[in-house]
Image (tube, rainbow, N blue to C red):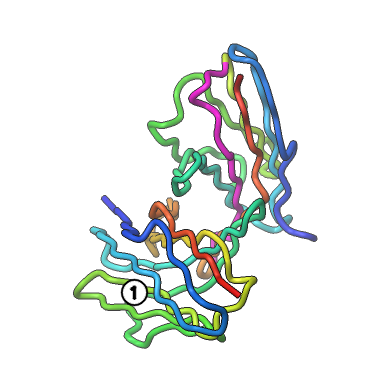
Amino acid sequence: AQTVTQSQPEMSVQEAETVTLSCTYDTSESDYYLFWYKQPPSRQMILVIRQEAYKQQNATENRFSVNFQKAAKSFSLKISDSQLGDAAMYFCASRAKAGNNRKLIWGLGTSLAVNP
Amino acid sequence: DTGVSQNPRHKITKRGQNVTFRCDPISEHNRLYWYRQTLGQGPEFLTYFQNEAQLEKSRLLSDRFSAERPKGSFSTLEIQRTEQGDSAMYLCASSLVSGVGEQFFGPGTRLTVL
């Protein structure tokens, strides 16, 4: 079974500052992906960043980077130089890499507010 | 192709009525997923298709729920005899089988059952 836990229901950050969102997971899969998705208010879910479990190097996408600690089953998202447009719900999710069903297992989300 | 589309975007219905939602995936995507998201929660998997075959259904999908994907293109999700607990956002996503299989999401259909 797979579970994803986000322990921060709400976070806030000042514009231009850095914020880190936490996520822990549990999985019985030997190989898997981890994701951070962003869901702006009344807008659709979009992928922010993806990490392959077998890769030790942390993924980076522009201002977004992850701290992937496989042994600790931790997968945090760091947003640098926060912008007003970063305000959204952020969901951590996991998915098996192989096999037929690649359903996403989601955390409860973290609501991020960006203060001007 | 502009991505995954879902219709309607909003649906208000009375308890006991039947509703049907439609999802049009990205054209070359052979996998299609349905998720349900209630307020303040993360999405929960409902079911998925590979082409026209429905390969897995969550236990969340009671016998009042049925999904189809005729001809492996668009998909419909029908809820019969709606209940207030069915009020939620219904999300559709599509992906390729090959490669990473990144799921691209539609805007969702928000259902309110009165």
Residue A36 belongs to magenta span:
no
Expressed as whole percent of the image width and height from the top left, the position of residue A74 reads 28, 71
Which residue is at the far left? A71
Residue B68 image-quadrant placement: top right
Q: Nearer the viewer, residue A57 or A44?
A: A44
Residue sitting at x 61%, y 40%: B52
The quarter of the picture where residue A96 lies is bottom left
Q: How many marks?
A: 1
Mark 1: which secondary structure?
A: loop
What's the residue at 70%, 37% (across, down)? Answer: B22
Q: Residue furthest top?
A: B16
Query: Does residue B77 appear to the left or right of B35 in the view shown?
Result: right
In depth, the one of A64 and A52 nearer the eye is A64
- Residue B30's x, y, as percent? 62, 53
Q: Residue at x 24, y 69 (%)?
A: A73
Q: Is residue A50 above or below residue B107?
A: below
Residue B34 position, x and y percent, is 55, 42
Magenta residues span B82-98
Left or right, B47 with respect to B10, comes to left
Work out which residue is located at the far right of the displayed protein and give it.
B1
In the image, is residue B92 part of the stretch drawn in magenta?
A: yes
Q: Residue at x 40, y 79 (%)?
A: A66
Measured along the vertical axis of the image, is residue B6 above or below residue A43? above
Q: Position of residue B15 (x, y in %)?
A: 59, 14
Quadrant the C terminus of chain B occupies: top right
The residue marked by circle 1 belongs to what chain? A
Location of the N terminus of chain B by quadrant is bottom right
Residue that label 1 marks: A53
- Which residue is nearer to you in this view: B18 or A112? A112
Mark 1 residue type: Ala
* Label 1: how many Cα within 10 Å (few below 14, some 14–19, many 20+): some
